[in-house]
Image (tube, coloured by chain):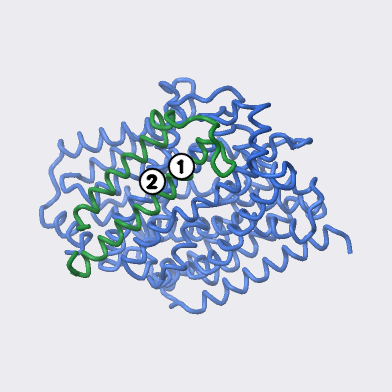
Chain colours: A green, B blue
Amino acid sequence: MSGRSARVLIVVWGIAYVVLLSWPGLTLFNRIEPKILGMPHVMAGVAGWLVISLIVLIVVDRAVSREETHLPD
Amino acid sequence: MERWQLITGVVLAYLAITLAIGLMAGRRVTHDVTGYVAADRQFGLLAMYFVIGGTVFSAFAFLGGPGWAYSRGFAVLYILSYGVIGLAPWYFIGPRSARLGRARGYVTQAQLVTGRFPSRSLSLLMAAIAITAFIPYVMIQMSGAGIVFETVTEGHIPFRAGAALAYGVVATYVLFGGASAVGWTNVFEGILMVTVAWILGLWLPHRLYGGIGPMFDRIAETRPELLTAPGLDAAGNPWTWSAYTTAFLSSAIGFCMWPHLFMKAFTARNDRTLRRTVVLYPTFQLFLIPLILVGFAGVLFPTHPENADSILPHMLMNTGMPFAMVGLFCAGALAASMSTGDALLHGAASIAVEDGIAPFVRLGERVRRHLMQALVIVVGLVAYYLAVVKKANLVALLLTAYAFIDQLAPPVYAALYWKRATTAGVLSGLFGGMATAVFFVRRPALKPFQIHEGILGLIVNVLLLVVVSYATRPQSEEHSTAFITTARGR
């Protein structure tokens, strides 16, 4: 992934983050069942999104770091 | 030996280790202002990761997080949500600020903003906002330490003595070690608080209900209103989506604008360290999950504390836990309190001197450092007096604090990204935003759609910034271009 694509990805991720974890996005998975790892669905959804965020940030950072050190993609 | 004495022994051991780490760390840096305020810009990833996590998660997270889940249900999800998106802008503005810091010697947020918008009034205003916001925040940390001591020692160590003991240790290592002591004690405190939170969060639901799933099954039968967003408000009525969403947005926008947190950008060894701290931050944020589980474990607990924020120590004292476990909890909660309180004391003293006094009076490096050290003690004593002796209304003060901090975002972003912004625009935006925020904090009934006062202030702030900037003469091309080019690094 190029540095430019990484910057686009982080903006898309940021918008999705705000929409999904507040109104109206949160209403899409705002229920108790099915539980995941014992947690109500909505809590597990928020926790899952944080894990996805970690992965997105790692991907973006690798691309930005590669661009900075001028290595080919 | 009595149980409370054994618990106190564990806590004293923790305090002794923290003090030793703080004092040793302080010996490794130079004795000038950059050494004291920014640890010679030498923090690597380990220190930065725990400095940010430890600073963000305070006694409020350790006691208030479970308290929110216990009393307001999934309203607490907004607290779990805002941190990661709140720190994300730091991935870009952190390295930009750090480059300017290295090139121009900045060690505080206001120095960076007034480097672009030269104004002593702006510097003083930003210092005043920071210190006004810090004092109630330090007070909450001190109260947290006092509550923990008093509860787990069954009153043998009273509230006043507990707060004095914990903050005596903090003031000592901040006084002698500055930012370096704050950083390295935060590594120890951060590891301790995260470990304790996960142990308690997994252990309490198992001990009381046989597991996390069975616990939520029982809550779903008796209190289902707690298990869907946006949860309940402070009075126990359903919270509104507009209040939930704007509280989330306000916290996310203000998150990396807290001046004591922002100025840590100037302590990083290099840009990569700063970026990786942001990337790894979600792993720290997840530590709120066990604290939320602890809060829910309290919902069906047979007895209830007077104050929701005491639910965690209340359960610990009533579940027959071994003394070592209670001592560790106490150390974990103190670690959460102290790892925030130290950064606040250090930040308040540094900002008061660098942004409040130095722009008006010419002072040498040595005098500035000594003045900061004296102010660490003064700020600590003022906060102690207000929190412990006078018992001021913390909640009202902290509400004002959060609404204020949001108003620092437009000046910072304008300094780093917007060439057309002018000093008059930034100043009028900041004044207007603060006046609006204060108005709605004092008159909450007038807030449209229960929108958070920080967001209402920001709307006025940004509008004034844009309108007044366009209405006034632009900065010289040379000045704004040089600033933004240095920030970009190319």
**Whole-percent x and y of residue B283?**
47, 55
Q: Amino acid at mark 1?
A: Ser
Residue identified by numbered label 2: B85
**Whole-percent x and y of residue A37?**
56, 44
What's the chain of the residue with tag 1? B
Report the front residue among A49 and B24: A49
* Residue B457 picture quarter: top left
Q: Are marks 1 and 2 on the same chain?
A: yes
Please state if A25 lies on the left or on the right of B480 as rendered: right
Q: Residue at x 29, y 62 (%)?
A: A62
The answer to whether the residues at label 1 and label 2 have Cβ atoms under 8 Å apart is yes
Report the front residue among B448 and B127: B448
Residue identified by numbered label 1: B81
Tell me if I can see residue B207 in this picture.
Answer: yes
Q: Is residue B143 above or below residue B115?
A: above
Q: Secondary structure at mark 1?
A: helix
What's the chain of the residue with tag 2? B
* Disc 2 packing (10 Å; few <14; some 14–19; many ≥20): many
Q: Residue at x 55, y 31 (%)?
A: A32
* Residue B294 picture quarter: top right
Report the front residue among B274 and B176: B274
